[in-house]
Amino acid sequence: MLRLRAICAFSWRVFHFRPFSCEPLISQMDKCTNEEQVFDLIEKNKAILSEEQVRCAFNILWQFQKQKTSLLKSVEYIRDHPQFLTLYNLTANKMEFMNDDNLVNVLYITQQFAVEAHDPLVEALVTEAWRRLERFDVNVLSKFSSCLADQHLYFSPLMGKIADIVNRNFETIQDLRPLSILMVNISSLISRRFQEQLVNKTELLFDTIDSSQVNTARRIVQFLRNIKYSYYPLLERCNNVFLSNVNDLDLDSISKILSLYQTLQFHSFEFILIAKKRLTEMIPLFDQPASFVKLFVALGPVAGPEEKKQLESTILLMSEELTSQQALAVLGAMEEMESRNSHLIKKIASILHKNLDTYSPVELLKVTQALIFLHFQSKELFVKLRELLHSYLKISVKPSEISILVCAISMLPSPHLDEAGISRIEAVLPQCNLNDLNSFATSILRWIQYGHVYLDNTTGKQLTLLQKVAHYGHQRLQKYNHLNLLWEELKSLKGDWFSETLLEETVATLQCLMDEINYTNVVGIASFISRTNYLNTLLLDKIASVVLQQIEKIHPFAVFAIILPFSILNYDPPQRDEFFGACIQHLNSYLSILDPLMLVFLGFYLATLEYFPEDLLKTIFHIKFLGRLDSQLELLCASLNMRVQFRLMELNRAVCLECPEYQIPWFHDRFCQQHYNKDIGSLNGAQQQIYKMLAEILGGINCVKASVLTPYYHTIDFECILDKRKKPLSYGSHNITLGKLPETQIVGSRLPPGAERIALEFLDLRAFCRNIPHLKGKSAMKKRHLEILGYRVIQIPHFEWNSMALSTKDARMDYLRERIFGDGKS
């Protein structure tokens, strides 16, 4: 009887408030033109609203909200409205009767109206959704995962449960839109194997999505960013979606895509060019700081001089209204833009100064790096910054955070670390990975350098600390027995300390694990070797072998990184022609779509290896390509712009000298004359020694020339001329003018019959591999070029000149005589 009464009570509660037809009220809501009309309907019908009508009311309010320009203001207005509270209470009472879709949809919209995560209604909705989780379809599951993501619950047990459901139902999911949402939200919790399965699934399903699904493509790129995987085939396909829909991309979309590309180091010249055009058109459209800061950050680094000036002047006018986070974003963009607007730098710095205590350790490091890069000076700001960093250091326990704080302190003027700071570092060293240890070492070395300059008495303690850092670095290296685990820590590792202290052992560990090198990690290992300047022929041979066997699985965009270490280190693998041939063949069909600057660098590095693929060179030295390159140069910062121009000049020179049969003209006279129109440079200590000795050996200062500029603009340290009897010739007597700026295609003044022109080059440690005296690619190419130009090239390695065997002047004089005359006599 009691059970029957309970059922009757339940029936009455469900149906008492529900009208016979929901349609009339929902139809009325659909016809509303603003929020007030919706709220009026809620007020009049609150006693009879069903869960379906509650859902409809939330939906319509959210549709109005999405059309607003001043979003935050509207959110506050809606959330604080009395009838929103009515909806709130109705939802709390009716949530158990809502279907799955409605429940999660109401949760989502409630969060969009800025109802806090700890609000009882939100907590109740999440709890109810958790209870039903196993029965959710993929669309509801994906929206619920987004609700959790909005609450930053990426590592929660609930998100873990969602990841498990996706894993169990992996084969049945065939809709890429909700799958892409789930992929982004569970990416922090899943294994590498599951990540790869999701990437493969995405490739299979990609053609099922409409080409206009920009958000799905963006989420795929975001997933790749989250799992730190620059998977070119998917990136390319997503990029094509963005290019096809560029007119539909708003500021938010462009800003996010550019940021994701930068993190993934994916370069799409076409997208950046179109994005720049779209963003430039938006400059007059935004007069609110929030939107304009986003535009400044996205457009600034790729803007031309006029656009940069416009952006900087506008942000300066808005500067008083900037929040602490907006000021930090502007500062980061100014660093990337290499801004020299001192007025704006001072203004942004003053905002930062007022808000320093609101920034996290990572943000304080960004502030420090940017201000120093922009050459900003303020004793008061830096003192406050140092105090804040020290206060964080006293309470921090995370190794990565402590390394960030120590790095920031070491970059400040007058860096100082007290006993407590040193103890804090020592305490976390056993828990540190290689990146943290490298960061600590770099910071300590800065302090030691500062101590030497100012005779600081703490250098002994710092050296002891440096030894402890090295000890834990060696210990950590010995623990690795899987290549991919080691690679995770190596991929961003660089710096003098690492090279001097751990590099040899790291390469030895890589060599032990080199059987694990395959198409998935070969690009990364090749990139690491390029950064180290360490020649290990076994590793390079293994890379070449893997590439030859698995070239079809390696994306053409990755070919440049694979070739790079062979070029820099001047090493030919056993199957040289097959290896380089396979790489170039793999690239050929992509020549028209690769970024111009990437092709220039590729062409140059192949040239250092005496490899000159005709199709590649004909592509680069074509008027259409050079036009595209000019357009891209406008998007680059000044330093990278100049580097690309130099590489193009060096490639042009190499082709003219080594492949005249291609009939590619030399067109860099003007560029070189602009660059070399000032003094070539002063001589260092060793060069001054050699210059004086050469003058003595050759019979006077007029028989040797220093800092000579050759045809095609190679610079050489010293030049002399011997006649057919090996007697030095005076430049004054024979009017040799090679030291002056040459005209186009000048081949040098004619020499007397039988005479030879000699180039002497002092080679410092940069000309050789780090571990053995093996000449690197650029130095070897220069030697070839000078010989083609008619020189006999004498290279004087630093390790020979500074050896014990040449510790006296007489020994060095004999060494030079032997190298020049070949018989030890003048």
Image (tube, grey):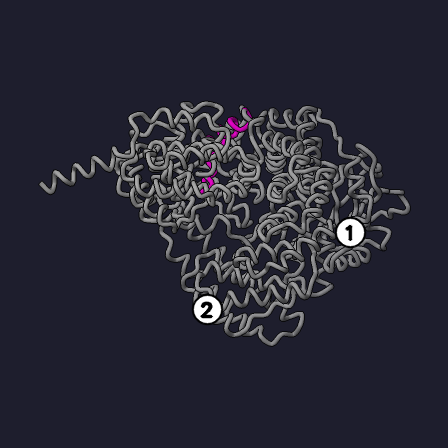
Location of residue 552 in the rendering, given as x and y in whole percent from the top left corner: 44, 29
Under mark 2, the amino acid is: Glu
The answer to whether residue 543 shows anywhere in this view is no
Please say whether residue 241 is one of the residues in the magenta stretch: yes
Location of residue 242 in the rendering, given as x and y in whole percent from the top left corner: 53, 29
Q: Do tag 2 and tag 1 residues touch (Cβ < 8 Å)?
A: no
Determine crowd level at label 2: few under 14, some 14-19, many 20+ residues with C-alpha closer than 10 A.
Answer: few
- Left or right of 140? Residue 249 is right
Give how far apart the Cα atoms at labels 2 and 1 are: 45 Å
Tell me where the magenta segment starts and ends, as one range.
Answer: 225-244
Residue shown at 81% from the left, 49% from the top? 679
Q: Residue 734 or 203: which is nearer the viewer?
A: 203
Location of residue 152 in the rendering, given as x and y in whole percent from the top left corner: 42, 48
Mark 1 residue element = loop
The answer to whether residue 122 shows anywhere in this view is yes
Q: Magenta: predominant secondary structure element?
A: helix
Q: Residue 783 or 252: which is nearer the viewer?
A: 252
Location of residue 32 in the rendering, given as x and y in whole percent from the top left corner: 47, 28
Mark 2 residue element = helix
Residue shown at 65% from the left, 74% from the top? 455
- Give the residue number, with chain letter if any, for mark 1: 681
